[in-house]
Image (spheres, rainbow, N blue to C red):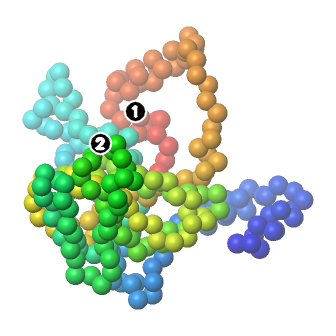
Amino acid sequence: MERGAGLARSRPFPRRPQLAMFARKTRKIEFLCKPEDEGVLAPPRPAREVMPDWFRRLPAVDKERLSPKNNGLTVKRCMPFLDALTTGWILPLVATVRLEIADGGKTVNAGWDFDRVMVSYHGKHQVAGHPHLPRPPSKFHNYWTIRTPPGWSCLFTPPLNRSNSIFEIASGVVDTDEYVSPIHFPFFATGEDGLYVLEKGTPLVQVIPFRRADTQLPAEIRAETPEDAAASKRVFRNTIAGDGWYRKSARAPR
């Protein structure tokens, strides 16, 4: 990596298009584990491969709702919803955890049979005023190290459009180009009192890599012009004129 950086600085001319394309293709996110854990830990998976069962079963058109006044479309035809589901990677629970919630959520106990710590706890003072208190702030332990190219970070967030009724992960952003070490995930147990078995491979967080420079776009905040309004109306009318316009004409290829 250092050699590549030095070479780029010493070039007298802009990088040729084919070399720039090669550089883009070689960018990657890495998920690293200890050698003895390979083949044991539940592995990260592309988010597009971990679709919720209810979404897989849902038809694109509900024929029972289809009528002259209703197109019967379901969220399966909603590209923004789908793109949220399929962006990035799903980092799973690496081993099965038993989570017991009691006293109206005030008490949380966890157990596991794996030979690594899977859950630990934070002090409530660390999140004083949080709306989930008095539920105790807890933490799932992760044994994958995530590494990204220079200038890239990762957003760690609850799996998008995959809500569960048992726990809620706290979102965070980590500069994974420099912080190359396992990242653990704080959470609140939000379920009703009872014993829950969280199986190995349960979706834990969605990992979305992004280039930090791209988050600093300047903003222009103003009233729309007549041209802006006309463009917006044209997009809206195209959207309602026929099914799939956004997917076919406005959505970037994936």
In the shown orientation, is residue 75 left or right of residue 183? left
The residue at the point 55 percent across, 15 percent down is: 224
What kind of residue is marked 2?
Pro
Residue at image mark 2: 131
Q: Residue furthest front?
A: 125
Disc count in the image?
A: 2
The correct choice, above or below, for 44 with respect to 24 in the image is below
The residue at the point 55 percent across, 70 percent down is: 180
The correct choice, above or below, for 125 with respect to 68 in the image is below
Q: Percent position (x, y) of residue 88?
A: 44, 57
Residue at image mark 1: 245
The residue at the point 58 percent across, 22 percent down is: 221
In the shown orientation, is residue 66 left or right of residue 222? left
Q: Percent position (x, y) of residue 176?
A: 55, 63
Real-space Cα distance between discs 1 and 2? Answer: 41 Å
Foreground of the two, 233 or 80: 80
Do the numbered discs 1 and 2 sit on residues whose CB atoms are within 8 Å? no
